[in-house]
Image: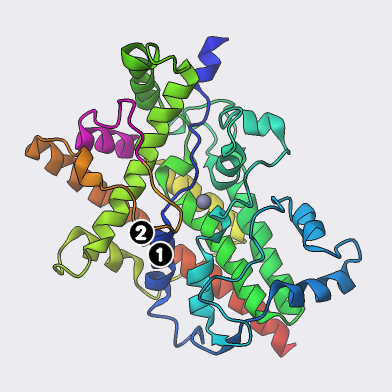
Amino acid sequence: MKWLFLLLFPFSAHAWTGATHHLLVDKSLASVATKWNLNAPVVIVPFENFLVKLAKENPKIQTRADFAEWLQINSAAPFDALHKSEIPDHVTTPLQILSITSPRPDDGRDRRLAIDHLEQFWFGRGTKTVSQAFRHMEKVPFDLLHPLNTFGFPPGPVGQATQRAQIYFDLALLAHRLEEPYWAWNFLGCALHYIEDLQQPFHSSQLIPPLAWKGLQSYFRWGFQEKNGFLKTLTHIASNTHHYFEGYVEMMLGGEHDAPLSTGALWNDALKGKDIFEKPLSARELAKNIRDFSNRYVYDTVEAVLKLTDGNLLGPKIYTTDFEDGPPENPTLFFNPDVFHRTDAAAQISRIVLTNFKYQGTAIRTIVRSFLNQTESKQGG
Ligand SMILES: [Zn+2]
């Protein structure tokens, strides 16, 4: 049964860094913000205000712990806390709330969840982040036309990211109905988080063959001697490449203002626009489309990251990114010294991110527009 271990999901603490989550929202909504009233004033209120109203509607939910249980999240996480920049009774805007909230589901609410053990098994066993991986990723079903990208086990989809997007979207509608606009936008921002995670190609795939092969080689090269288990070495390699891609993207985005044709500026431009997907879709259907779209790029993403870093991610050193707490580890320290290989790899990553950001900008606008359509028509009725 050892082959089964090859198929396990690489676990990861989170997807995009906090800064990238903010930027995805800010840039995607910039050109529609005024027209859609996303700069209108919204008063910041504590979670208790929403909870009191919810408790009247649903007597089973009286405390924040009841709410956490109902939503199947970890009650030890600060899911109900306001951001440090948000002061109760002060005024903010929907755009600011969406931006501040979109990294929030990485706050631990989806960690250490004792649910759906069998499904979680495919995301790596016995780690505290496994349930977060299981919530923030979703492997696409196997497709014979795209065997390398969709490879994995079991062959069907695994993970809950598309479902979580829908759950938070519905929660936003509920908060709106209870006349708690701050919390409606907060929950909508959380829905965007899962939408954004799914656009990261590593989040819509499993341990694809080239990564499994590198993990196997690393195990025999150093994992074995360092008494690292086989599975631990494999997840280390998968996690390093996964996080490096995110750190690299954040670094490149930071260079936006250096030159109008810099990679970061082009990626930012790809997010901008006013278009939305024409076909009416639920949040989950949209999330599934994003998942399937980004998955087609995972093989190329892995190849490009490995080429860009020339084996520097394949040793025992851990590449880290932090949630919200400052920039990721400097990606240039892992660069391939061969500038021609590096240029090829950077160009490949540039195209992958550009294509996915274009799709992401449209998706974020579509979901916000859908929320506005549903809430505005209710106001009208
Ligand atoms: Zn996440």
Mark 1 crowdedness (10 Å alpha carbons): few <14, some 14-19, many ≥20 = many
The residue carrying mark 2 is: 357
At x 27% / y 38%, what residue is drawn?
305
Q: Is residue 239 above or below residue 368?
A: above
Q: Which residues are magenta?
A: 299-319
Q: Which one is nearer the viewer's eye here, 265 or 292?
A: 265
Where residue 178 is drawn, which disc sits there?
Answer: none
x and y percent of residue 252 in the render?
Answer: 24, 56
Identify the mark nearer the N-term, 2 or 1: 1
The amino acid beneath tag 1 is Leu
Where residue 24 is drawn, which disc sits there?
Answer: 1
Instruction: Assign the C terminus to one quadrant of the image.
Output: bottom right
Instruction: Assign the N terminus to one quadrant of the image.
Output: top right
Local secondary structure at mark 1 = helix
Residue 147 seen: no
Local secondary structure at mark 2 = helix
The amino acid beneath tag 2 is Phe
